[in-house]
Amino acid sequence: MTYGSVFSRLRDAAPDWDAYTKHAFVAGLGNGSLPRSRFLHYLAQDYVFLIHFSRAWALGVVKAETLDEMKTCAATVDGLVNHEMSLHISICAEAGIPPDTLEKTPEAQGNLAYTRYVLEAGFSGDFLDLVAALAPCVMGYGEIGTRLASEKSSDVYAPWIATYAGDDYQGVCNTVGAMLDAAVQRRLGPDWMRSPRLDALQHRFDTATRLEVGFWDMGLAGA
């Protein structure tokens, strides 16, 4: 999956990308070996994460310079709060965990570090800083879902995999990737790969990717 030229450039230069997308937690989702207790712990943390992640995307509406950017950010918020989070609610409900309990989940350290970093990137930086910090989560899950669906090694976590491999989520990845391409060219010009800003954006992307690895570590540890 490419999801746009800017994302491809950032991903290919990110030293921890494989550690993120091929983490032991991800492998356990694919082959079904991940303990259910670890999965439910991760889902509860991810539910809280998505609340803050949605706020970060809403901040994108404020930081945007074009109506198209605003529309993409607003649509992403809608997809997160009205669709992706429903996956967490339904799976946890089947395990006897109601939505009000999910919302009261104490945030693990890795969760706090990641969500606050992304929000800080948006508050202290501009639109590009924010989206560079948001991109690893959005497109990384799309890449993971597509790969796990193609491998089809287990049906234990099939609903989770199907969500991120599905057309709706893949459409979000492609739309965000196109927005990132347009946003970078608008601000940095057609020769954006030579821009002095690229190193700073790569740093944002790399940091968020490293925090994704930490999020999987937290899920695998169950604490």
Image (tube, rainbow, N blue to C red):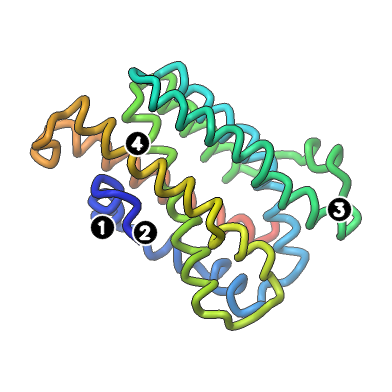
Looking at the picture, tell me which residue is in the foreground, 147 or 222. Answer: 147
Label 3 sits on a secondary structure element that is helix
| CB contact under 8 Å: marks 2 and 4 | no
The number of callouts visible is: 4
Distance of label 4 from label 1 (alpha carbons):
19 Å
Residue at image x 77%, y 41%?
105
Earlier in the chain: of badge 4 and badge 1, it is 1
Distance of label 2 from label 4 (alpha carbons):
21 Å
- Is residue 9 at all visible to an observer of this figure? yes
- The residue singled out by tag 1 in the image is 12
| CB contact under 8 Å: marks 2 and 1 | yes
Residue 101 percent across, percent down from the top left: 85, 41
Q: Residues within 10 Å of mark 4 (few under 14, many from 20)?
A: many
Q: Residues within 10 Å of mark 1 (few under 14, many from 20)?
A: few
Earlier in the chain: of badge 2 and badge 1, it is 1
- The residue singled out by tag 2 in the image is 17
